[in-house]
Amino acid sequence: MTSHSYLQAQQVAEPVSFQLNWGALAGLRWGNPQGQVILALHGWLDNAHSFLPIAQHFIDSELQSTHQLVALDWAGHGHSDHRPTGNYYPFLDYVYDMVQLCEQQQWSKVSVLAHSMGGFVANLWAGIEPERIERLLTIEAFGLLTSSENEVLDDIRQGFRSRLRQQGKRRPHYTDLNSAVLAREQAGDFSVAIAALLVERGIEQLAPNDFRFRADGQLRCRSVMRISPQQIATILQAIRCPYTLLIGSQGHRQRLEQALSTWRTAVPQLQVMDIAGGHHAHMESPDAAWRQFCALLATENG
């Protein structure tokens, strides 16, 4: 999909902001503000622009009159606030942000479309609040990054060291936008066009020749404690909704196959589909990702 293909979605997007107990979650909304809710949850160091290509398919569909697609910026990402000084970014806090948001907005039922880190958060959330999540599609994410119980001390020590190291670090600055785009492209597995789309929402200009990514540096800190594989299985077993996992043909297949071998039996209704592209396959093949999501919406729940 070329850049002009999602220009309309970018132009008609409604900026939204939701005040939670720690700060504001920003995002973009398309469709009927009173319609059924589809939440789009992006990956680590990405932002709501991750779903612009899919949003174009949404606004071209009949669903735009009956549903609202809300693509959020996670805490510390995009236009959302950073967590207050002294706080970090554990996965379960992201889940609680979603619980808070839905309680505040009185969204008793939502469908979720999520990529990478957003997908990890979403499948935990679907187990923790199975009555709220009606449909779940994740791209390149199943289960969670985990450690065995005998690794707990090493995890804590490394997590503390990473926090100490981060205290002395300064977010990199760039003299022009193109340099920032190239840096993002080199750090990812995607084209310059996709990098530019993510950078557009993920950058701030401080002076005429001074650009800086908005993302909180604390996002790079290692988790101090990780949930054990058995604990993750317990959460996944509680998922009741229809669930589809999309795996990119050039994505993180080996890691996902390992996760599936560990936890697939915990989610017997899980459907696994291949999609063309890398780890950001939903941006590279948004038409295919959208078709799979529409098929998921059409399935019976329960």
Image: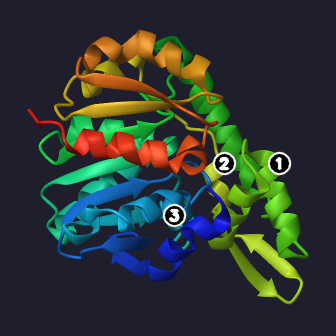
Q: Using a 10 Å C-alpha cutoff, classify the residue at mark 3 as few (fewer than 14 neighbours), some (14 to 19) or many (20 or more).
A: many
Location of residue 38 (image quadrant): bottom left
Residue found at x 49% / y 32%: 225
Q: Quadrant of the N terminus?
A: bottom right
Q: Using a 10 Å C-alpha cutoff, classify the residue at mark 2 as few (fewer than 14 neighbours), some (14 to 19) or many (20 or more).
A: some
Q: Earlier in the sequence, mark 2 or mark 1?
A: 1
Tell me the amino acid under the disc marked 2: Arg
Residue found at x 56% / y 17%: 151
Residue found at x 58% / y 22%: 253
Tell me the amino acid under the disc marked 1: Gln
Whether residue 246 sits left or right of residue 32 in the image: it is: right
Residue beneath disc 1:
186
Q: Position of residue 239 (x, y in %)?
A: 21, 31
Residue 171 visible in the current orientation: yes
Residue with the most extreme bottom position: 208
Residue beneath disc 3:
52
SS at circle 2: helix
Spatial CA distance of label 2 from label 3 is 25 Å
